[in-house]
Amino acid sequence: MPIERLPATASGADVGAALERDGCAIVERLAPADLLARVRDEAHPYIAATPYGPDEFAGRRTRRTGGLVARMPSCRELIMHPTVLAAVGAILSKATSFQLHLTQIIGIEPGEPEQPIHRDQWAFDFFPFPTGYEVQCNTIWALSDFTAANGATRVIPGSHRLADRLTFTEPDSEPATMPAGSVLFYTGALYHGAGANRSNETRTGVNITYAVSWLRQEENQYLAVPFDVARTLPDDLLRLIGYARGAYALGYVDDMRDPLDVLRGVPSAGAMGLGNLEAAATRLRDG
């Protein structure tokens, strides 16, 4: 099955429909050249200081540079891209809300073999989520061209509907080739893996992942983003980081205060009554 490719003008609903059907999709050239240049410039010193992965899965010739919200203002534009947020909201619509799960720049250097094909949602302690209930949506923005030779992410379209704990090899998958500025979307249930880099160039992408707000974040955003930085960020990004209730009673502070109010220093107005849980969830979902 080929990977669905959409133009930069595609709506979030279009991307969400492709994700529902195939578990993956590519939107080509969504990020403008000037934004890519800023990301590369800001990323350079951090990538240079990042060690290689500690094992074969992380990649012994792969650098994974995280903490992008605090370190790189340009990446906040990718995180908050309206097409991305609309697509993520569509595929994770069964939950009250979603949050930022992790941020990484992944640089796969020449000589790195293919990564084992896996599901990203296995990070949740291999819990067997029901088929069709998506809890995670991932994006990989191409900072460099992704080719079959340089380690383009390999995906198995439609595999988000297959049984869990299956084993696949590289020939079972398709390379998500795409020009710089494009973005690959795929769900946490999709079987995929980084391709082998058989070229003489480094394949670099920005991996930004979102998950439903009732699951723990893979990257601890509260420590990755220091308070003095967090207090300078806009409310919408802070809510996405996790300064919001994940559902009616998930993530409150002390006397049921909203975490964003605590960060902003807003005085307590008293505890919220339990009220109607369904109505409260609807208010949270609708913003």
Image: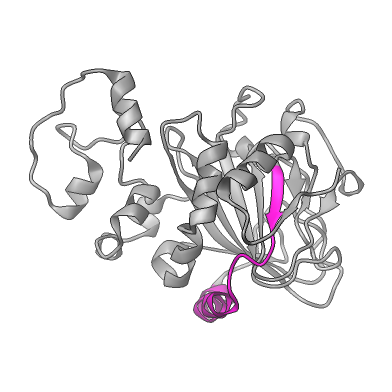
Camera sees residue 12: yes
Q: In the rendered view, does 144 fall on the left or right side of 237?
A: right
Q: In the rendered view, does 273 fall on the left or right side of 221?
A: left
Tell me the quadrant of the picture where the N terminus can be found: top right
Of residues 129 and 14, the one drawn nearer to the viewer in this rendering: 14
**Residue at screen point 12% across, 29% down:** 271
Please check the rendered image and state whether residue 38 is part of the magenta-colored stretch, yes or no. Answer: yes
Tell me the quadrant of the picture where the C terminus can be found: top left
Camera sees residue 248: no
How many tags in the picture? 0
Q: Which of the 4 quarters of the picture holds residue 106?
A: bottom right
Of residues 29 and 73, the one drawn nearer to the viewer in this rendering: 29
- Image x and y of residue 273, in percent: 16, 22
- Image x and y of residue 101, in percent: 49, 47
Q: Is residue 236 above or below residue 95?
A: below
> For the magenta stretch, what is the residue range?
24-49
Q: Is residue 52 above or below residue 223?
A: below
Q: Which of the 4 quarters of the picture holds residue 172?
A: top right
Q: Is residue 204 above or below residue 57?
A: below
